[in-house]
Image (spheres, rainbow, N blue to C red):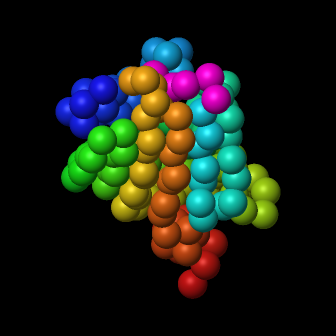
Amino acid sequence: MSAEENITVVREHYNAFNKRDFGYGSTLVDPGLRWINVPFATTYEGPEGYKQFLKMWTTAMSDARVEITNVIASGDWVAVEFTGKGTHQSGPLAGPKGPIPPTGKSIELSFCEVFKLKNGKIALVRAYFDAATLMRQLGLMP
């Protein structure tokens, strides 16, 4: 697949997130997918892991949305910078030390995700974000 075709697949993933269409989104991933949440040192695997990772955010923030700010691609690799926004009011958020009960606080956080695609499917993702900023915005750190 070309870099442009890989960008299209990755953009479709973000569109599926914003639409809460995790069934469609899971068709974009390779059965052997590894989705690594780098700051929290957790790994999600396969289509079910894909859904679990995304639902972690939308369960905690039913109004969560992402807005892509930059996409860079080379071959099978795609890097995406985006802003995630939401209000932590609808459920627990999986944190590095366990579930974080709803805080009622809004967040606006910069993310970077690096994708490796294989045969037109998302095979590996490393998700990066500033966990300290997230915790501060949730009112859990000074």
Q: Nearer the viewer, residue 78 or 37?
A: 78
Residue drawn at (40%, 58%) of the image:
111
Position of residue 24 relative to residue 78, above or below, is above
Residue 60 appears in view: yes
- Asked whether, in this view, residue 81 is left or right of residue 91, the answer is left
- Asked whether, in this view, residue 34 is left or right of residue 18, the answer is right
Residue 5: name its quadrant: top left
Residue drawn at (49%, 60%) of the image:
128
Q: Is residue 81 magenta?
A: no
Q: Nearer the viewer, residue 73 or 47?
A: 73
Residue drawn at (30%, 26%) of the image:
1
x, y (%) of residue 122? 47, 32
Residue drawn at (43%, 34%) of the image:
117
Which residues lie in the magenta part? 28-32
- Asked whether, in this view, residue 34 is left or right of residue 8, the answer is right
The overriding secondary structure of the stretch rendered in magenta is strand
Position of residue 79 relative to residue 31, above or below, is below
